[in-house]
Image: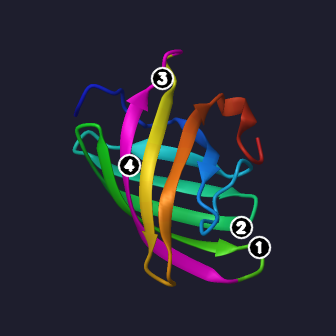
């Protein structure tokens, strides 16, 4: 699958994002991955009430679509390509380039693996 380990069962939090994005430091992503490269995640926190993403992994790259509902009740969706990077401490980072499909705008973001006990609702 690539040099980075599986995303399955890992939790990520937003570190940085362009202002046009909805993901912030309070957003948590719970990732799942199957052996054939199918990936999906549930996410929530900050201005995101509930979101899901689904796509494919090819090596250390991800290509997926995302949809979410914000805390103000609006819906949004888009497309993202991410690169999985193993940081110096062994945790994973996702370096992302995204674009809205439901509204104008695009940008880059960074999400980083966190300890599972920091999951929203845990």
For the N terminus, which image quadrant?
top left
Q: Are marks 2 and 1 in contact (CB under 8 Å)?
A: yes
- Residue at 42 percent of width and 37 percent of height: 7
Q: Dots 2 and 3: beta carbons under 8 Å? A: no
Query: What range is drawn magenta here?
Result: 74-89
* Residue position marked by numbered label 1 in the rendering: 71
Q: Nearer the viewer, mark 2 or mark 4?
A: 4
Q: Which of the two labelled residues, at mark 4 and mark 3, occupies the earlier sequence position?
A: 4
Residue in view at x 56 percent, y 36 percent: 112
* Element at label 3: loop
Residue at the disc numbered 4:
82
Among the two numbered marks 1 and 4 on one chain, the one whose residue lies closer to the N terminus: 1
Quarter assignment of residue 80: bottom left
Mark closer to the observer (2, 3): 3
Mark found first going from the N terminus, 1 or 3: 1
Which residue is tagged 3?
87
In the picture, measured across the screen, residue 38 lies left or right of residue 48, that is left
Could you classify mark 1 by the number of other residues whose Cα lies within 10 Å: few (under 14), some (14-19), or many (20 or more)? some
Residue at numbered disc 2: 49
């Amino acid at each position: 699958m690539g040099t980075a380990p599986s995303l399955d069962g890992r939790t990520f939090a937003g570190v940085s994002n362009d202002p046009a994005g909805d993901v912030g430091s309070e957003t948590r992503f719970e990732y799942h991955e199957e052996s054939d490269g199918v990936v999906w995640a549930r996410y929530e926190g900050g201005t995101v009430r509930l979101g899901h993403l689904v796509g494919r992994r090819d090596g250390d790259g991800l290509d997926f679509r995302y949809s979410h509902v914000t805390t103000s009740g609006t819906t949004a969706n888009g497309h993202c390509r991410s690169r999985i990077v193993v940081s110096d401490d062994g945790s994973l980072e996702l370096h992302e380039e995204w674009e809205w499909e439901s509204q104008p705008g695009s940008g880059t973001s960074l999400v980083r693996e966190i300890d599972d006990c920091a999951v929203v609702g845990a």
